Amino acid sequence: MKGLFYLATIIIFTLSSSANAEAIYHRLIWDNSPQFEATIGYTPTTNAEYYVTYGFSPNEQNWQSKSPHTSTTFDNTLESEFVTLSSLPANSPVYYRVCSSSGCGERLWFKTAPTDNSPYTVIAGGDTRTGWTTRRKGNQLVAKIRPLFIMHGGDYTNANTASEMSEYLSDWQLTFSNDVIEGTAYKRIYPFIATHGNHEDRNYNTLCQVFGVDYNSDNYCDAKDTFGAFNISPLLRVYTLNSQFKNSGWSSHANSMNQWLSQDLSINAGSAKWRMAQYHKPMYPHYTGKSDNTILVSWWAQLFYNHGVNLVVESDTHINKITQALKPSGIGFTSTTTGGTVYVGEGSWGAPARSANDPKSWTIDFASIQQFKVISVTQEKLTVRTAQFSSGAETLTKSQRDLDPLMLPGSIQWWSASDIGDSLVLSKATNGLSIIDSGNGGPVDPPTSKEIAIGETKSGLAGSSSAEIHFSIPVPAGTKNLSISTSGGSGDVDLYVNPGQKASSTRYDCRPYKSGNAESCQYTTPTSDTYFVMLKGYSSFSSVTLKVTGEVDGNTGGGNGGGTCDVTGIDVYPNWPQLDWQGNPSHASSGDKMVYQDSIYQAKYWTQTIPGSDNSWSTVCQ
């Protein structure tokens, strides 16, 4: 009996030691040839020598072992080891455990990328840095969706310290899916493609030190590991770029990156059906608190368009946005229905959502929400959906994902965009770029904005029950006592008003909801430079009048009372107030005033058009 007790004690002690010696903070990286290769990362918990044992079935008797090729220390504290597996079978499961002399840890598995045109699901998002509760909800949603891989747009933490990165990596374990394979418990781990964000700027080696990224395959950890490209399969090539090279002191790295990008796009862009890019800073943030990054436009916009980049994922701003298919125009963009690049983003995978308040003429819709993108990739189309982080989503099983690589869980809270719905469907134009598919075989035309200025009246408005009429109101800085009202006519129309983003029946700041057509919304001190109005028929209506009044620069109405405008100190077209990256006058930005033909106009967003010639301008004085 004493012998049995002693044996049991040894077994318990051994199991306890093994558990305590397990590696932690598992992560899996794709940076090259994901059909045949992957880099396994982990943090050791003892001074023992760790290694990875792996195979292509759950039968561990047939597995082989490999020692780490790289060990790193991040922020003087966080230790990591990396093992790159190569010569893997394509489109196949790979099973592995991290072991040491004390034993082996939990069982993990992942799937390699295909070499054929098999479809798959991708998750893309960024800015996990703060808001841990929401970040964890997003991570848990990954486990429910079961993507082939993840694109992370950067800003993993706030201060980029070892303690915060450890917390991030601990939370990342929530992305793993629980499986039982041949009677044994496994966790599915999802590879991700890492991007450098501005919150990594204190250490430009973060990607290689924390994740083992080696985009250029030189076995050396430096800032060159922050950009690269590779084919996921014949369907998709992914480009990862470093927008932070725009910072002072990094011009040589920027030049090197952009020369590489131009060459790679010329040589390899046609090697896959679709081309996607990710980087951190958006070219044109959809939040007024962020400056336009026109240097990125000058670097990449034309290259993307010339070489058929179909979809770009941006981060940083902590909002959600989708755009029309775009083509470069000067230092900006115009919408196109004949093939362009679609831009989506902008972060908010945990970081507190900011106000979505800076739409462009080519924005389809935007919102202040926590989200990431779920992208379905097929030969015929890319379908982009925006998932919000509710806890009610169902969980896909392994067998469901095995049967259908595009299946998505039920009860996900999908964001619905105006004029598009919850699915942004991209098909390929004859020029290789993207057109937005309306579902009837044709592209979606860019929406025509109906603008009404302060001091203006729209009469004769009519519609059927549930019909919607939309307007935008440019609101110059300093405007007071903004009044938006409906009156007259017959029937019953409801007024909806929302600052900063398009009004809808679920998105509004003011909704009087009265019988008849006499409704109004009042704003003593407007908080946005654009107010959006929706008129929706409670029943059919006709001959309704919409009126907008306010005090602009001390004048009642729109400032167009027929007097002489005071143009002192205001730039006269074509003397642009803003400069391009070379220092030449080139454009106006949101809030800039300009004089044209003795009238004063204010830019609602970035523009190069003649003041007052289109909807990018509001009238201040005529």
Image (cartoon, helix red, strand yellow):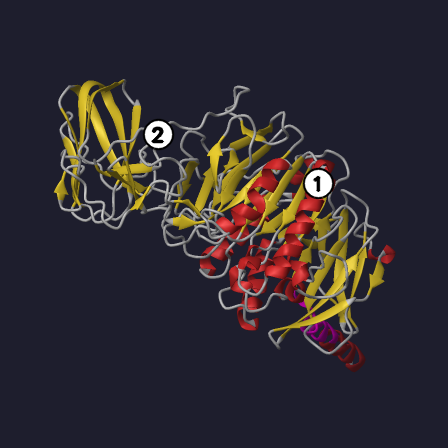
- The image quadrant of residue 530 is top left
Q: Is residue 330 visible?
A: yes
Disc on res. 389: none
User: Neighbour class for label 2 at 10 Å: few (<14), some, many (≥20)?
Assistant: few
Distance from label 2 to label 1 (Cα)?
37 Å
Question: The disc labelled 1 sits on which kind of residue?
Answer: Ser
Q: Quadrant of the N terminus?
A: bottom right
Q: Answer left or right for 254 relative to 516.
A: right
Q: Position of residue 595 (x, y in %)?
A: 28, 41
User: Neighbour class for label 1 at 10 Å: few (<14), some, many (≥20)?
Assistant: few
- Pointer 2 residue: 449
- The image quadrant of residue 8 is bottom right
As helix, strand or loop, the secondary structure at mark 2 comes to loop
Q: Quadrant of the C terminus?
A: top left
Of marks 2 and 1, the one in the foreground: 1
As helix, strand or loop, the secondary structure at mark 1 comes to helix
Q: Is residue 120 visible?
A: no
Identify which residue is drawn at 80% across, 80% down: 3
In the displayed structure, would residue 596 be above or below residue 94?
above
Q: Residue furthest bottom?
A: 2
- Residue 20 lies in the magenta-colored region: yes
Question: The disc labelled 2 sits on which kind of residue?
Answer: Ser
Q: Position of residue 422 (x, y in %)?
A: 47, 34
- Whether tag 2 and tag 1 are in contact, CB under 8 A, the answer is no
Name the one closer to the observer, 258 or 202: 258
Numbered range of the magenta stretch:
14-25
Name the one closer to the observer, 57 or 299: 299
Q: Position of residue 546 (x, y in %)?
A: 19, 28
Identify which residue is drawn at 43% across, 37% down: 363
Identify which residue is drawn at 50% across, 42% down: 344
Q: Position of residue 538 (x, y in %)?
A: 24, 24
- Pointer 1 residue: 266
